[in-house]
Amino acid sequence: MLIFDYDGVMLDSVREIAVTAYNMLNNTISTRLDQLPQNALELFLRNRFHVQPIGDAPVLMKHCLEIGEDDPNKLMRPEEYEEIIKQVDEPVAARTTRFFETRNLFKTKDINAWIKLNAPVQPLWQIMTEKPTEDLVLLTNKNREATISLSSHFGLMISDDNIYSGDHGTTKIENMTQIMQRFRLPSYAFIDDSVKNLREIDEHFNRAEKTISLIFASWGYTGPDDARMAEDFGYQVVALDEFSEQFKAM
C-alpha cells in the first residue's frame, strides 16, 4: 500500500498557508498575497520546509515579520528554527486548532480567493484523477475539511475514510498507527516531502523490522540539503516526473 502526504506532494498550498498564518497572528482576514509584507512573505516561503505540524507555521511567520525587513533572503539553519519553536509556550495542538479555525474564516469570507492560493501538483494530480481512487490513502497534517474541499474542487474524489488528517493536533505517527491497525498489511510505503516526517515514521515503526518503505518527494517544500539527507538515511529519493510515470504504471 502506497500512502501519500498531501501538502507539497499532491497540492501546493504554501501561499495559502502563508496568508492564513499571517491572518492568525494579526486577527484579520487578508485574502491576497499583496496584502502581506512582501519581504516577510518571501522569507516565509523560503523557510517553509522547516515546518512539520502546521501549528508551527504562525511561529515561523511571526519570526519572518520580525526580521524580514533586515534579512529577507535568510535561509534558517535547522537548529536556529528549532530554537524559535522552543521559545513558544502555547502547545502546538492549540496553535494547530487556531490555524484551522482561521483557515475556515478565510474560506468562509472568500472561498474563491482561498482556492486561488492553492494549486494541484502536475502531472501527478491529473494522473490521480484518471485512476480509481478507492485505494488512495492520505496521511496529512492538513485539516480534513480543507483536504476534501480542495480535492473535490480540483476533480479528485477521495473517500472520507481514507483521509488521515491533522485535526485536533493528531500527529502522523498517531494516524499511521490507525492506518496499520485498519489495513493489517505486512508492508507499506509512504511518500512525503519532509525528511523530518519520514525520519519520525522510520524511527517509530521500523525499529524492530522494516515495515514502512520511505520515499522522499524532492519537488515539495524542501530545503537545499534535504535530498542528500534523505539518501543518507536510506530513503528513496524521487523527482516529480519520474514518480508520476511510476504511479501511472501501477
Image (cartoon, helix red, strand yellow):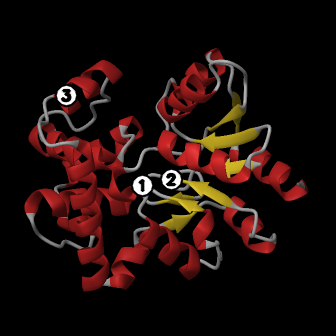
Q: Is residue 90 left or right of residue 182?
A: left
34 in relation to 189, above or below: below
Q: For this rendering, which residue is in front, 205 or 198? A: 205
Mark 2 and mark 1 lie on one chain; the one further toward the N terminus is 2
| SS class, disc 3 | helix
Mark 3 and mark 2 lie on one chain; the one further toward the N terminus is 3
- The residue at the far right in this view is 249
Q: Do the residues bearing badges 3 and 2 touch, measured as CB atoms within 8 Å? A: no
Say which of marks 3 and 1 sits in front: 1
- The residue at the far top in this view is 232
218 in relation to 116, above or below: above
Type of amino acid under label 2:
Thr
Measure the alpha-carbon separation of dots 3 and 2: 23 Å
Type of amino acid under label 3:
Lys
Q: At 34% from the left edge and 79% from the top edge, which residue is drawn?
A: 113
Q: For this rendering, which residue is in front, 77 or 194? A: 194
Q: At 17% from the left edge and 73% from the top edge, which residue is drawn?
A: 29
The dot on residue 86 is 3
| SS class, disc 1 | loop
Mark 3 and mark 1 lie on one chain; the one further toward the N terminus is 3
Q: Position of residue 146 (x, y in %)?
A: 43, 70
Q: Is residue 184 left or right of residue 50?
A: right
Measure the alpha-carbon separation of dots 3 and 1: 21 Å
Q: Residues within 10 Å of mark 3 (few under 14, many from 20)?
A: few
Q: Do the residues bearing badges 2 and 1 touch, measured as CB atoms within 8 Å? A: yes
Q: Position of residue 222 (x, y in %)?
A: 49, 37
**Residue 218 in view (yes/no):** yes
Reading the image, the residue beneath label 2 is: 140
Q: Is residue 88 left or right of residue 246?
A: left
